[in-house]
Image: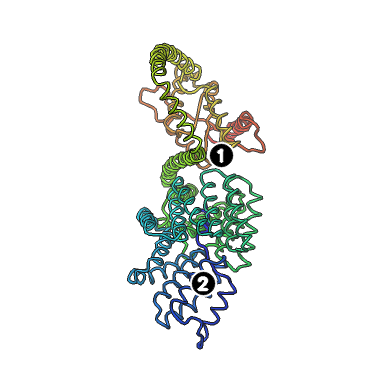
């Protein structure tokens, strides 16, 4: 699922009854509830440190307090009230409205030098920037948060800044630092006695662990966070945690649990009148519908969610909804609507430009151009997609490295005391036995070097021989291409990945047309040159991750990963062109053609590679029966 998790990022801290009571009073002209500006500021701060309530209610009920501040010219109270409303809008994923308030009150806060409000506005800037696709200044904003930490003393404020810092680091895939910041936030909230915010941190940690592939630990943190939200009756928080938990289920292919959990999240969001929460959950349901090729349902949901995200100014979610609609329309072969949605998505792409978003756009455009028979344009988009996918692969490798670094850092901390004790004991022992051990070490080193040199010499000779014979055993002596054994080994490895990880695997059997006639009329030497030419065409045309090999006689086996029928048709044409781009001295003057039978891995049908090959071979037979020089799926 391509959706970024919806983060539970701000605690809205007021009892509903208290808030409604005061809001009602401040709406009255004779109201004397707040005798001074300090009383109102104190009330707002008390509100931030009470139990969680629905931020939708806060947005509605804080307005009378803002009007009261303006009427009495209480500038400080106005800043505190407005910043709380801004936070409540952010929690509802309404960044556009939140940004309007930020632009209004930031100059006033800077002029008044209200440090507490300024801290909250820095945090808000980071969250608004991500939601509205303004990530170009993320590094600068992260440094601003880190600088702000040095001037804070209250555990509550320190916790809030560490939490925002961790989420910003998470947004730029710096998982190791994000986890460290989250743990610092948890410690600060623990010191402040804020159990609700400890639950928020657990939810954010869960999202990080899900992203780095530790689904089990992520679900464990979600459960702890949900337990806290239930204990304080925080329905808004419950809906967000359930949404994120559903995404974790989807990533681990637990589709039934994902749908069930999303249904609960939607139900709670409707109970508390949170249309944005409903839209986020429906966006995930639409992604599942696309995965299940339920195109009509997906389009219906994408249209509903896109309308909500347009109103809230959430550009990233708008883009995902438009891309999802285009994909679903393509599934229905409705090119006109697919193109219309992609045109809208392209306008937003510059604001949300990252590898995964650009890859989705280019891949869909390639499919459309190919369907319209604009083959060069389709190829250009496909080439862009492949370049982006390579970049994504590198990014995934970096994330994997960070995952292991996180695990390593955690292990170090858990064993820190034990390692320190062992180090002290070892130092004492080293002092007592230093002279004796030094002599033993010198002897051991000399002996070890002699043995190592001897062993390395043997290993080098043995390795060279083994690699030489292994290479000979896996190469076809005529074409110098992988032989039957080699290509079957490659196919079985890809089959294992496909069956374990749910990846796409496609096998194709190729047979050179009228090859016997070539041998009979021109001799076996020319036939051998045709086979060599086909091997060279495969080398020049296929991608690095694909495989091929001489399967027997004039038959070849091709192995494709992460591809579809449109791409294979393009490859067929490119192979054919490369095969017939003959040098002038090539003795065979006629066009060389071949037939191709293709079969894709199906978990319900295929228990091994031979099953797929058998189905591809059947398709090859059909290609021959239909007149040769074609590909049949």
Colour convention of the picture: rainbow
Please report whichever mark, 2 or 1, sits nearer to the chain's N-terminal start.
2
- The residue under the point 50% across, 87% down is 29
Distance in Å between CA atoms under marks 2 and 1: 46 Å
Q: Nearer the viewer, residue 32 or 393?
A: 32
- The residue under the point 52% across, 35% down is 560
Mark 2 or 1, which is nearer the eye?
Answer: 2
Contact, CB < 8 Å: mark 2 with mark 1?
no
How crowded pointer 1 is (Cα within 10 Å; few <14, some 14-19, many 20+) is rated as some
Location of residue 386 by image quarter: top left
In the rendering, at what x and y percent does residue 350 appear?
39, 56
In the rendering, at what x and y percent does residue 39 appear?
47, 77
Does residue 295 appear left or right of residue 543 in this picture? right
Above or below residue 519? Residue 239 is below
Residue 178, disc: none
Residue at the spot of label 1: 503
Q: Nearer the viewer, residue 65 or 90?
A: 65
Disc 1 is placed on an element classified as loop
Above or below residue 65? Residue 558 is above
Tell me, yes or no, if residue 459 can be seen here. yes
In the rendering, at what x and y percent does residue 47 appear?
52, 70
Residue at the spot of label 2: 59
Tell me, yes or no, if residue 627 can be seen here. no
How crowded pointer 2 is (Cα within 10 Å; few <14, some 14-19, many 20+) is rated as some
Q: Nearer the viewer, residue 406 or 543?
A: 406
- The residue under the point 38% across, 66% down is 115
């Amino acid at each position: 699922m391509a959706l970024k998790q919806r983060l539970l990022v701000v605690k809205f801290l007021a009892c509903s009854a208290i808030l409604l009571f005061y809001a009602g009073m401040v709406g009255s002209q004779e109201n004397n509830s707040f005798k001074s500006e300090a009383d109102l500021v104190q009330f707002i701060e008390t509100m931030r440190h009470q139990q969680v309530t629905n931020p939708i209610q806060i947005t509605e009920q804080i307005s009378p307090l803002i009007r009261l501040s303006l009427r009495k010219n209480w500038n400080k109270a106005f800043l505190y009230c407005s910043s709380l409303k801004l936070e409540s809008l952010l929690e509802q994923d309404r960044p556009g409205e939140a940004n309007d308030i930020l632009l209004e009150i930031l100059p006033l806060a800077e002029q008044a030098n209200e440090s507490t409000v300024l801290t909250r506005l820095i945090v808000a800037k980071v969250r608004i920037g991500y939601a509205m696709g303004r990530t170009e200044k993320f590094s600068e904003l992260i440094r601003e948060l880190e600088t702000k930490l040095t001037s804070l003393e209250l555990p509550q404020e320190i916790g809030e800044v560490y939490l925002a810092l961790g989420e910003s680091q998470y947004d730029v895939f710096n998982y190791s630092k994000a986890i460290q910041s989250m743990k610092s936030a948890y410690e600060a909230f623990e010191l402040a006695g804020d159990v609700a915010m400890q639950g928020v941190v657990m939810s954010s940690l869960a999202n990080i662990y899900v992203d780095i592939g530790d689904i089990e630990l992520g679900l464990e943190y979600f459960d702890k966070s949900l337990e806290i939200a239930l204990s304080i009756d925080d329905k808004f928080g419950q809906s967000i945690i359930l949404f994120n938990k559903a995404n974790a289920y989807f990533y681990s292919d637990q589709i039934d649990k994902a749908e069930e959990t999303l249904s609960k999240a939607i139900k709670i969001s409707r109970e508390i009148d949170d249309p944005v929460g409903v839209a986020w959950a429906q966006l995930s349901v639409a992604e599942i519908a696309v995965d299940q090729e339920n195109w009509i349902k997906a389009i219906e949901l994408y249209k509903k969610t896109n309308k909500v995200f347009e109103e809230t100014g959430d550009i990233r979610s708008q883009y995902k909804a438009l891309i999802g609609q285009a994909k679903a329309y393509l599934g229905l072969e409705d090119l006109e609507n697919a193109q219309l949605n992609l045109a809208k998505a392209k306008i937003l792409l510059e604001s949300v430009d990252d590898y995964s978003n650009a890859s989705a756009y280019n891949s869909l455009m390639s499919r459309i151009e190919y369907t319209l028979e604009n083959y060069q344009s389709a190829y250009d988009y496909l080439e862009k997609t492949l370049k982006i996918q390579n970049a994504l692969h590198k990014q995934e490798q970096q994330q994997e490295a960070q995952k292991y670094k996180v695990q390593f850092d955690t292990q170090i901390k858990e064993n820190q005391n034990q390692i320190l004790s062992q180090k002290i004991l070892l130092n004492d022992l080293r002092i007592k036995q230093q002279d004796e051990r030094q002599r033993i070490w010198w002897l051991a080193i000399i002996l070890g070097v002699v043995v190592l040199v001897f062993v390395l010499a043997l290993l080098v000779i043995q390795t060279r021989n083994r690699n030489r014979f292994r290479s000979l055993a896996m190469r076809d002596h005529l074409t110098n291409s992988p032989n039957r054994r080699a290509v079957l080994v490659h196919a079985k490895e890809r089959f294992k990945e496909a069956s374990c990880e749910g990846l796409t695997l496609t096998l194709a059997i190729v047979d050179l047309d009228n090859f016997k006639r070539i041998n009979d009329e021109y001799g076996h030497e020319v036939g051998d040159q045709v086979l060599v030419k086909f091997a060279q065409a495969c080398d020049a045309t296929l991608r690095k991750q694909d495989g091929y090999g001489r399967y027997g006689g004039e038959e070849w086996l091709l192995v494709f990963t992460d591809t579809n029928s449109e791409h294979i048709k393009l490859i067929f044409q490119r192979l054919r062109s490369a095969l017939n781009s003959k040098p002038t001295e090539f003795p065979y003057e006629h066009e060389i053609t071949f037939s191709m039978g293709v079969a894709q891995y199906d978990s319900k049908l295929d228990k091994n590679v031979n099953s797929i090959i058998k189905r591809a071979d059947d398709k090859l037979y059909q290609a021959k029966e239909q007149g040769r020089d074609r590909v049949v799926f």
